[in-house]
Image (tube, helix red, strand yellow):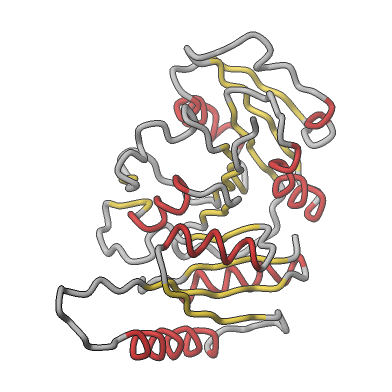
Amino acid sequence: MKNILVPVGSSKNALSHLQYAVDFANAFNAKLFVVQVYNIYTKAGTMIKVDKIIERESLSYLNDLVSKLNTKNVDITVKVLKGNLIDTLELACKAASIDLILIEPRTNSVKEEVFLGKTSGRIIKQTQIPALIVPEGCKYKPVNNILFAVKSVVIKKDKALIPLISIKSHFKSIVNLLLVKTPYYNDGDFEVRKNLKSAIDSVTKTENATTFQGVLQHLQSFNPDMLCVVRRKRGFFTKKWENNVILKKDFSSNIPVLVLRVLK
């Protein structure tokens, strides 16, 4: 894991989130890209050029945040990018060979009842970039225990496991695989093949309506430092992300959540 990207909004948690990102990048000797994406929606007939103003103010804001960090000699690149949020982030990640994107739950939302805001939700739902959701105020610490929850371990894209394997290898983490049998279960979904066997230390099987409910049932017994889930059409946050926002009453986490790209 050599390149990590952090999109920054205007939340009061931005500085704390960036410090976590620096500490995490330092552990992997990775380069950190701190970015802010903006777009301009002008009214018909409006001729005022505001791009340079927004770019200048955004860059000043990011540099001010970085100046307050304990950078620990981490190589940090600061960028302000213009364009559609998802398209721009995907292009930036491709250009910089990003291995992981670190996301704070609420980049702009100030509503206390919200766990994952609209912007963060869009990044998780609409991209295939591996992401780590870091809870507000979370302090960096080694990841000793990971709960990897899936409804199927049919893996056709080996690269999808790279973030999980990298974290396990670096921290010598214990990875507990939770296989959740849902109504969408297919024969072979629980067949753990060699491309995953070497990465896990234990297997637990459960039967629940959704992967999400399986995690709720078993999370306390595993007491992990990190939860790992997978993007898919009928995945961990089925329906909960229809509007890109997740409320705390539906899901909340006080540990980082690693979201892998689709496995199939």
Residue 41 vertical position relative to residue 75 in the rendered view, above or below: above
Residue 117 at what x, y percent from top left?
Answer: 34, 55
- View extreme (front): residue: 45
Q: Picture quarter containing residue 20?
A: bottom right
- View extreme (top): residue: 187
Residue 92 at what x, y percent from top left?
Answer: 57, 66
Q: Residue at x 47, y 30 (%)?
A: 233
Q: Picture quarter containing residue 10?
A: bottom left
Name the quadrant of the C terminus.
top right
Q: Residue at x 77, y 33 (%)?
A: 200
Residue 195 vertical position relative to residue 62 in the rendered view, above or below: above
Residue 84 vertical position relative to residue 173 in the rendered view, above or below: below
Nearest to the observer: residue 240 or residue 147: 240
Residue 43 at what x, y percent from top left?
Answer: 16, 74
User: In the rendered view, does 132 fall on the left or right side of 60?
Assistant: right
User: In the rendered view, does 242 fall on the left or right side of 135?
Assistant: left
Q: Residue at x 61, y 73 (%)?
A: 33
